[in-house]
Amino acid sequence: MDSDRKYRQRGYQDSEREHPVRDQKPKGPRPPIDVTGPRLPRMVHAVTAARCWNCATTLPTDVDFKGNCPKCNSPLHCCKQCAHFEPSTRFQCLKPVPARIAYKDKPNECELFSPRVTVARDAAGPQANGGGFTPLKVYEPRSPSDARAAFDSLFKK
């Protein structure tokens, strides 16, 4: 039957007995994916910081919210910098204000003002604060010969 066929590819005319199963899975326990062992989790700390509503610059902790942003000079005591500012609510404020403040980006004298504080992840946090684990040290080569020597030391004969 093979002599009358033009190509020797497997197809619907072949029987299972003619071709052994090539995709047999090895028996026994599976080896681990990483043979070096489990990796340590990256510890990420949360950093709270106030940011400018206009330029998103991180503001120092001792900033006076009665003044202006040190980078873009926009007012910091305004509705857009407030933690209670919500555009979808009445008067665009979560607190019960007696009257609407027309300009949300202009300085005002609202007694309910509290600065908006964001929580961000800081990847350098655990190393700086001494928590969790010690990271691997990365050495930068001082000259091209140092880099070449480090590369050659990896592949010694």
Image: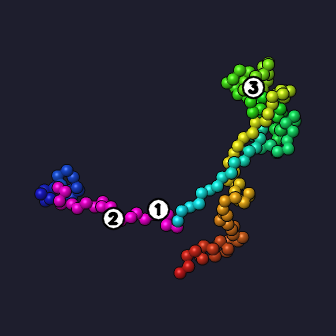
Residue 86 spot, x, y in % from top left? 70, 28
Q: Are marks 3 and 2 in contact (CB under 8 Å)?
A: no
Instruction: Say left or right for 104 vs 26.
Output: right
C-alpha span from label 3 to label 2:
66 Å
Instruction: Say left or right for 11 vs 144.
Output: left
* For discs 3 and 2, the disc positioned in front in the rendered view: 3
> Does residue 54 show up?
no
Query: Residue at left 70%, top 43%?
Result: 119
Query: Residue at left 71%, top 20%?
Result: 90
Q: Which residues are magenta?
A: 15-36
- The residue labelled by disc 1 is 33
- The residue labelled by disc 2 is 27
What is the crowding at mark 2: few (fewer than 14 residues within 10 Å), some, or many (at least 20)? few
Q: Give, as a three-letter code, the residue at label 1.
A: Ile
- The residue labelled by disc 3 is 95
Residue 19: in magenta span: yes
